[in-house]
Amino acid sequence: RMCYPRVIWVVRHCEREDNVNRQWRNLAGMNVFMSDNSPLSQRGRVQAHELGKRFSEEAIAHVFASPYDRTMETAHTIVEMNENHNLRVKAEPGLCEALYLCTKPHPSFWDADDLNKKFPLVDASYDPVFSKYTLPKEGCGDEECVPRLNTTIQRIIQRYAGPILIVGHGASIGAIHQVLANDFKYVGQATVSKFVQSGNGLEEIKLVYSSCTNHLSDPRNLRPW
């Protein structure tokens, strides 16, 4: 049963290895990732832990994340550190990066079974809005993913009650701001945005704040673009 008001948290993934190392795929163990699926950097893992501390005592009913490794590790760290030990990560392809930035013909993020081997707190029973094979065609440009995010967010909000946390990418979080606040907005890596839903429907959702860095020990160079 839906109860309002409820909070919708939106978190961008932490720093990626390819942000700091162009030769990242030559590192040991990295050959399992395609070019669009960089994992977190060492700094990114510190940021994820700081996000975990930020949300450790926050009431969260459901966590949704793009299935890319960087978003999954960010979300998984938050879930691991939350006081709700029944919390799981729902891997949702509809939250993935703008498709023009992904490998062709399909994004290279792993399927749920492989994700579950690396990230044990993945919800294997989750029925996603999209699969990598049903993602809609998109043109070139970050805002091209807005219709997909509109569908994804509407479905999540209709299906799931309670406070929600979503982990996405620069473009997909920009699109979430467009869908929920009519303002496509870029946010920094590892930042937190807060929306509150006061009744049924997207028009009942209001932005409280965007791109908060208060939880980060080093808020420099968070690459909002």
Image (cartoon, helix red, strand yellow):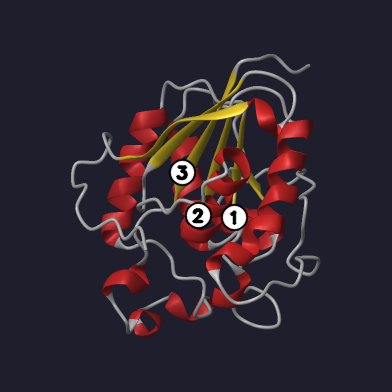
Residue 71's label in the rendered image is 2
Is there CB contact under 8 Å for labels 2 and 3?
A: no
Where residue 198 appears, as percent x and y from the top left, is 63, 18
On screen, residue 205 above or below 218: above
Q: Which residue is mark 3?
A: 11
Q: CA distance from mark 1 to mark 3?
A: 11 Å
Q: Quadrant of residue 21?
A: bottom left
On screen, residue 37 above or below 206: below
Is there CB contact under 8 Å for labels 2 and 1?
A: yes
Amino acid found under the numbered disc labelled 1 = Ser
Q: SS of the residue at dot 2?
A: helix
Other-residue count near label 3 (Cα within 10 Å), few / some / many at <14 / 14–19 / ≥20: many
Where residue 207 appears, as percent x and y from the top left, is 50, 32
Q: Quadrant of residue 135?
A: bottom right
Horizontally, residue 157 falls left or right of residue 193, namely right
Q: Which residue is mark 1?
A: 66
On screen, residue 212 above or below 173: above
Nearest-to-viewer mark from 2 and 3 = 3
- Image quarter in which the C terminus is found: bottom left
Other-residue count near label 2 (Cα within 10 Å), few / some / many at <14 / 14–19 / ≥20: many
Q: What residue appears at the point 71 percent right and 57 percent down from the top-left corner?
A: 148
Amino acid found under the numbered disc labelled 2 = Thr
Q: Earlier in the sequence, mark 1 or mark 3?
A: 3
In this view of the protein, which residue sits in the foreground, 124 or 220? Answer: 220
- Image quarter in which the N terminus is found: top right
Horizontally, residue 190 falls left or right of residue 197, namely left
Amino acid found under the numbered disc labelled 3 = Val
Q: What residue appears at the point 70 percent right and 14 percent down from the top-left corner?
A: 3
Q: SS of the residue at dot 1?
A: loop
